[in-house]
Image (spheres, rainbow, N blue to C red):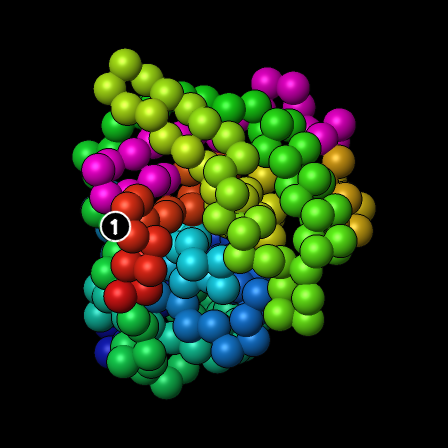
Amino acid sequence: MTGPERGIWLVDATHREDLATFVERAMRLDDAAVIRLRERAGGQVVAWVATGFDVLASRVVAGTIRPPDLTAGADALARGLDAMDSSGHVDPGFPMDSAWRGALPPDSGFTHIDDVPARVVLELAQRGVTLAKQHGSAHGPPVSLLDQEVLSVSSAQDNVGIPMRCVFTLTAMAFLPQSAAASRDTGFDPATVAADEIVRVRALPAWLRIDARFGSVYRRRGDPALVLR
């Protein structure tokens, strides 16, 4: 590879659109969001954002980056994606590495706990939105609602509770294949998702991971405050 010393090189326009959607959703949650990008073996780039729900969100696209671990402002990255040239190069803007606070979960080693129908997740999101409107404030949903474990999944090795924080992050980041109308209206209509669509729950002793069709969310187990430390 020759050319710029710093940047992202995406395989094609489809991956540009995927990353642009991720960045746009991150900015809806926080217009000052920063995006961390890390190169993964096999020609992949993983994008990360620390959401206001104290949950990490990530999405994988095909491409390469230089350096192999960089952080960019979401607004600058969005502009770079809009201007991606014919070589697939994206200018991520001014380095923002010092703005990223906290460790990332490992790439591997997670144990599969169980699969959950996506419709169940959307039903939980519907209820959560209703409760947030009833009991929330200008600062958002109450902490008690966000911390409430709304689903429990288990395997022979582990039992995991899924807090509303993770449900809200999955829907806010559009990681489930909702209809455009449902997503726009925050209706999260379960009927717009195929009955066999699932989310996969995995875990490590220190991390909860939930994989959906368009991305994954991660939450520290134990002391939740550690997710951004």
Looking at the image, is 93 positioned above or below residue 164?
Answer: below
Quadrant including the C terminus: bottom left
Q: Is residue 175 visible?
A: no
Q: Which residues are magenta?
A: 190-209
In-image side of 186 versus 50 (left or right): right
Lateral position of residue 139 relative to residue 115, left or right = right
Residue 203 lies within the magenta run: yes
Q: Which quarter of the image is occupied by the N terminus?
A: bottom left
Asked if the magenta segment contains residue 119, the reply would be: no
The residue shown at (29%, 34%) is 203
Element class at badge 1: loop
Q: Residue furthest top?
A: 156
- For the point 23% across and 44% down, the residue is 206
Q: Quadrant of residue 73?
A: bottom left
Q: x, y (%) of residue 159? A: 33, 25
Q: Amino acid at mark 1?
A: Pro
**What's the residue at 70%, 56% (across, down)?**
135
**Lateral position of residue 31 relative to residue 182, left or right:** left
**For mark 1, does the 10 Å Cα neighbourhood hold few (<14), some (14 to 19), or many (20 or more) residues?**
some
Front residue of this view, candidates 2 and 184:
184
Q: How many marks?
A: 1
Residue picked out by circle 1: 105
Q: Position of residue 152 (x, y in %)?
A: 45, 27
Q: Position of residue 137 (x, y in %)?
A: 68, 66
Residue ID at (51%, 43%): 148
Query: Looking at the picture, how far across and down is residue 226, in whole percent?
Result: 28, 59
